[in-house]
Amino acid sequence: TALSLAAAQGAAEPGPLAGKTLLLTAGPTREALDPVRYLSNHSSGKMGYALAEQAARLGADVTLVSGPVTLATPAGVTRIDVQSAQQMLEAVMARVEAHEIFIGCAAVADYRPVAAATDKIKKSQETLTIEMVRNPDILATVAGHSKRPFTVGFAAETRDVEHYALDKLARKKLDMIAANDVSKPGQGFNADSNALTLYWPGGSKDLGHSDKATQAEALLLTIAEKLTK
Amino acid sequence: TALSLAAAQGAAEPGPLAGKTLLLTAGPTREALDPVRYLSNHSSGKMGYALAEQAARLGADVTLVSGPVTLATPAGVTRIDVQSAQQMLEAVMARVEAHEIFIGCAAVADYRPVAAATDKIKKSQETLTIEMVRNPDILATVAGHSKRPFTVGFAAETRDVEHYALDKLARKKLDMIAANDVSKPGQGFNADSNALTLYWPGGSKDLGHSDKATQAEALLLTIAEKLTK
């Protein structure tokens, strides 16, 4: 029978995210100053890719909108590559209604140069002033959508982590936020491990310190719990 | 005999750069804005790494000062990793007297933020102004050294390539410059091929369009010719 065949293939138990659709962002964005120069950040994409991989393993239908990283696409994950925050916003908003969960794990550049030069800037001056404007807030845009998914953000901070995380949770009207202190060694942008604390309206959960796959699974299982309540 | 043993190992013919010492830089630099953000450029490091690999194959003793790239160190090459232009300058100047040839292939950031913030910048404003100052000019510093090596620079331009290349050759008092037009498809920063034109005081040589290993070998053989004259 189909059931025994599924069991023989090790797919007997439907995963805790079986049938759920997850849209997530990962990696940095790059904001062009001119054809050769850009502003970016140290996000490796490892946490977002760990989330995509674990979510697929737990049964979710996963779409990953990714900034420039050097990581392989996890098995079973649909990946869309983007460079800038504006491209990431467009890729996300085109798909947000079709997904039940959104996790904004990308380290989106907060600002972009006012106008990217078409030709390479010549270095004729001793000083250079770059005028920057705020990028669109992808997380807040998703959370403000009339058909919003369960919306989860990340807060990577160098100090006052809980304060900034709770402020971001409330201000952007998120369902959950995963906070970490990137100033501590062994967690954050280029590390293979992490130490997330989850906050949601009225509660929190410390995930301890472990590899990013374990942190990702714990975060996804917490989301699955909230969705079934 | 030692000679026949060398011949049996395929090392009978000394390479055209045998016994020569080459110091070169490759890749981009990253200039920190704060602990998470940086300014960089699209240099992949492929051209510099191709030069390091071919130079070692042609018999040179090669030291590669490299910005952050995702490339493997070529066999037989000594690699020193750096991030910022200032770190790259220090790594180069500490070694410049011990080398007969210098090739500046890195895409060194021309400017860096006046002061890198210790904590992550909070995005509380609609606009942000970044004040930048000129970075040290590594190539000109090497060329201006009292015991300067044979000094070769690169010019990656988006227009008026020959004009800017000849200007840079004269202004920085280089022995040779390798110019390419990065606005053309299939050459430049992330491509596997290139189309360099070499200029030196009183002459030039068009290397045509080919893979970066072939371009690297042709450039190195031209340098070897100049050194033996």
Image (cartoon, coloured by chain):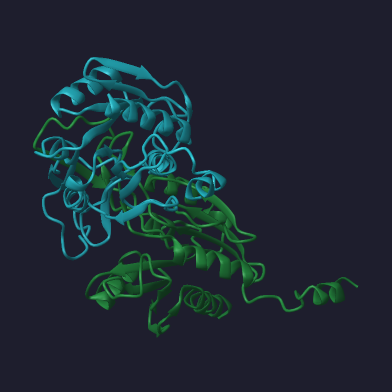
Chain colours: A green, B cyan
Q: Position of residue A58 (x, y in %)?
A: 62, 73
Expressed as whole percent of the image width and height from the top left, the position of residue A168 reads 31, 68
Tell me if residue B157 can be seen. no
Q: Position of residue B36 (x, y in %)?
A: 27, 60
Note whether B32 is above or below B140 in the view shown: below
Does the rendering let one see residue B118? yes
Q: Is residue A127 left or right of residue B99?
A: left
- Using the image as rendered, state which of residue B61 and residue A222 is in the foreground: B61
In the image, taking residue B16 as reference, residue A64 lies left or right, namely right
Which of A213/B76 is in front? B76
In what quadrant of the picture does the C terminus of chain B appear?
Answer: top left
Q: Position of residue A61 (x, y in %)?
A: 63, 62
**Residue located at (38% from left, 29% from top):** B221
Q: How many numbered marks are there?
A: 0
Residue at image point 65% right, 60% down: A76
Q: Is residue B91 above or below residue B211?
A: below
B25 w.r.t. A109: above or below: above
Q: Quadrant of residue A155?
A: bottom left
- B32 left or right of A8 in image: left
Q: Which residue of the protein is positioned furthest toward the top in this rendering?
A: B202
| Residue at left offset 50%, top offset 57% | A71
